[in-house]
Image: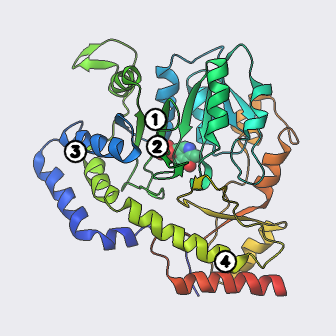
Amino acid sequence: MNIPFLDLKSPYIELKDELDAAYRRVMESGWYILGREVQSFETEFAAYCETKYCIGVANGLDALHLIVRAYGIGPGDEVIVPSNTYIATWLAVTHAGATPVPVEPDERTYNLDPARIEQAITPMTKAILVVHLYGQTADMDPINAIAQKYGLKIIEDCAQAHGARYKGRRAGSLGDAAGFSFYPGKNLGAIGDGGAVTTNDNELSERIKVLRNYGSQIKYHNEVVGFNSRLDELQAALLRVKLTKLDECNERRRIVASSYIQDLTTITPLTIPFIPEWAEPVWHLFVVRQDRRDELQKMLAEAGIGTMIHYPIPPHLQPAYSDLGYKRGDFPISEAIHNSVISLPMWPGITEDSIVSVCASLHKVHSA
Ligand SMILES: *Cc1c(COP(=O)(O)O)cnc(C)c1O
């Protein structure tokens, strides 16, 4: 048996004609940076996310970093971040010179626990950077209420949540601004790096456009100290093709997830994903929890099943952030999650047979 954790080539095979045509269109256009493809993708992705504006940038980290900068958040300011996230969320804050203030997750959803946010707010707090981890949104209504009460910006990290909904509303439209990643393995993935900001805030949108392009609106006139962080024409053209299939791909992921859930609920040592009634997740990852996770991963590998750990080490224990002074035990919920999660094979084209085999292996491991 060989069931990979993720198959990145099958989406190309499936959409070959359309992707090849988009590639040729760009190659033959003679225009490769900030042109018609990026503009069209921005219009189409804003419509998809139900926001007024979308600005294409180079990657997901830049999308978040530029939002933090554009809101004027920097040294001396604090941004609330989840303790349980991928390190990019924190990097967006520290790259702008601000300080990340971690808040623990709800242990059932793995996302920011609204009940713990208020005690982390200080006079220096400027924003809450919310992550919709694994493709399921955080509980946004109470988070927005806190932001409103304290006058904080809400920034969404949507890198894993393209198309997810919260009470019927799309991820990317649930706060003041959102950052998306189009890294190949994401639900909407490019053939390389890419990212975008979505927002209804016109002023922010204009500032991001300037920041992504050397701080310049008119070529060679530089108003602010900017960056080179542009989505390129080729990636935009390929993303436009993939965007037309995103809902269908997310629906296939949903069917995969419900097959897993149905089959795996009977394995008691395994914690399967919890879906609050207001959530419509898009299953970027299918993550289960179990003690002695490393042993389980090894046994599945021996059976030919690829898995991944998202993530093995929380940001506060990474050597990169040793200067923040955190130690083991500071964020016990997040640490327990990091020690016990394991992600099962998940992509839109995974076959029913493969799902059955993964589940059978898990049953076998647990009956031994
Ligand atoms: C992938 C990811 C990012 C960063 O996206 P890149 O395009 O790789 O820069 C940020 N946050 C989360 C939660 C992610 O999964």
Q: Is residue 152 left or right of residue 194?
A: right
Disc 1 designates what residue?
Answer: 63
The picture places residue 334, in percent across and down from the top left corner, at: 78, 47
Q: N-terminal of the two: label 3 or label 2?
A: 3
Query: Could you give the CA–CA distance between mark 4 and mark 2, rounded to whole angstroms?
Result: 31 Å
Using the numbered discs, state the Cα–Cα distance from disc 4 to disc 3 in whole angstroms. 42 Å
Q: Residue sitting at 35 percent across and 36 percent down?
A: 54
Circle 3 is placed at which residue position? Answer: 37
For disc 2, the marked residue is: 180
C-alpha span from label 3 to label 2: 18 Å
Task: Say left or right for 280 vs 295.
Answer: left
Q: Residue at x 22, y 65 (%)?
A: 18
- Above or below, comparing residue 68 to residue 130 in the picture: above
User: Is the distance from the Cβ of mark 1 to the nearest ligand 1 atom less than 8 Å?
Assistant: yes
Q: Which-is-in-front pick, marks 4 and 3?
A: 4
Give the residue type that dot 3 points to: Glu
Query: Which of the 4 image quadrants contains residue 367?
Result: bottom right
Q: In terms of depth relative to the viewer, which is nearer, 177 or 234?
A: 177
